[in-house]
Image (cartoon, rainbow, N blue to C red):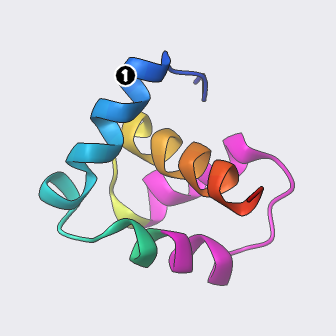
Amino acid sequence: MSLNHSPETQTKLIARVPSITGRELPEWFEAIDNGPSFLRCEERANWLADEHGLSHGYAAAIVREHERRRRF
């Protein structure tokens, strides 16, 4: 699974996260922060998908956005 979507696809996925998952991004970011301490983004995305029943595309988009926002 690739965590690298095009910027356009990433934007569209992130915009749909609340309606598709029923949770806002800050809730997902908190789940990632409180979840297992994985070193790799791909591991975090797999955990989100498996633990929370997300598609891998949405899980990867959430992890990528979490990483992007943590840098600022």
**Residue under label 1:** 9
Q: Is residue 65 left or right of residue 35?
A: left
Splitting the image into 4 quarters, where does residue 15 fall? top left
Magenta stretch prevailing secondary structure: helix
Splitting the image into 4 quarters, where does residue 33 fall? bottom right
**How many labels sit on residues?**
1
Q: Residue at x 42, y 30 (%)?
A: 10
The segment highlighted magenta reads 29-51
Q: Amino acid at mark 1?
A: Thr
Specify whether residue 35 is painted magenta: yes
Tell me the quadrant of the picture where the N terminus can be found. top right
Q: Residue at x 60, y 22 (%)?
A: 4
Tell which of 1 and 4 is nearer to you: 4
Tell which of 53 and 8 is nearer to you: 8
Task: List x then y, in percent, for residue 69.
Answer: 63, 57
Task: List x then y, in percent, for residue 14.
Answer: 35, 44
Specify whether residue 44 is painted magenta: yes
Q: Is residue 43 left or right of residue 45?
A: right
Task: List x then y, in percent, for residue 59.
Answer: 46, 47
